[in-house]
Amino acid sequence: MLDIAVKVLIPSVMAFALGIAFAPFLAGLLYRKQMWKKRSGKEAGFGGGGTPIFNELHKEREVSTPRMGGILIWSSVLATALLLWTLAQTLDTYWPTFDFVNRRETWLPLFALAAGAAAGLIDDFLEITEGKDGLSLPRRLAIVGTIGLIAGWWFYAKLGVVALGIPFGAPLVLGVLIVPFFALVTLAIYAGGTIDGIDGLAGGVFAIIFMVYAGIAVGEGQTSLAAFAATVAGATLAFLWFNIPPARFFNSETGTMALTTSLVVVAFLTKAVVPLLIIGFLLIATSASSLIQILSKKYRGGKKIFIVAPLHNHLQAMGWPPYKVTMRYWVIAMVLAVLGVIVALVG
């Protein structure tokens, strides 16, 4: 058990250290190039019309704090994976123990992380340089859905996964339908990426979620996958170090897409998709609050359920200080993590 813990945690610590070392350079570059939005807020909400409350909450920081901070997360993960793989190939000592790159467990999550990062980076770049909202929502959803379809096909055709694990029950056999189902789950979790709206909020929640899945993977005997998830958690903690209020930079789409797409892959690989409803409940609640708000305004004559969506901004509008929202989300995320682990490993 000690050997497993070392293999899982050493890459996590390395990713954290690399992230801490890289952050000053990244921050300096982003500030020199003024990589922030040129105007704050949004011109219109998803349901149409203006978003004055949302814009008021974001009127200052968005035009003075750089985006693309998510580069710190995925670059630290990829650098750690590459470094350990290289050392394992060149030094035949104990380094192969720490190499977690392999076809069955980590090729796919690494692909999802890199693909999401690249797509999000394009969106961020367009938003910053053109002064618009980046890629349109349909295009972003199409990209995320495509990543989900590719990953779903890999599960079905290459890994032979045709069923969904149901806690305390028999597996639900989906056959080829596992492919579109995978894409739908990916889109749903990506929608929860809007939790990246308060300093420190997304970083803390994602770090907890990925570390939980590292533990679940260990319980499933998937040590390399556990190392990957722990590495993402370590890199995210490095990002969080610089994202705690006042944030040096924002995660933005390059980080959000990378984290959400790779998270879904990890959940499917550990056969803990249903527990994701618990472990990732805050992500789901975030996207659900926005959807509920849109439907309410459309079908109830413009009436709103929340002062402003998503949920964390509603709490801000109620008068909660941002730090209180963030820290209470962290607490809830930890409680949900415990419940999710129980369901995943006992069920």
Image: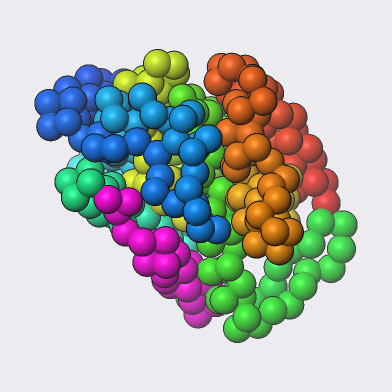
Residue in front for this viewpoint, 280 or 15: 280
Question: Toward which corner of the image does residue 296 lie, by quadrant?
Answer: bottom right
Colour style of the rendered protein structure: rainbow
The residue positioned farthest toward the front in the image shown: 301
Q: Position of residue 333 (x, y in %)?
A: 67, 32
The answer to whether residue 248 is left or right of residue 227 is left
Q: Position of residue 138 (x, y in %)?
A: 42, 67
Question: Measured along the vertical axis of the image, is residue 338 above or below residue 142?
Answer: above
User: Where are the magenta residues, as a range?
Assistant: 132-157
The answer to whether residue 273 is left or right of residue 321 is right
The answer to whether residue 326 is left or right of residue 20 is right
- Residue depicted at x 66% and y 54%: 302
Q: Position of residue 78 (x, y in %)?
A: 30, 43
Is 156 one of the magenta-colored residues?
A: yes
Is 220 one of the magenta-colored residues?
A: no
**SS majority, magenta:** helix
Residue in front for this viewpoint, 257 or 112: 257
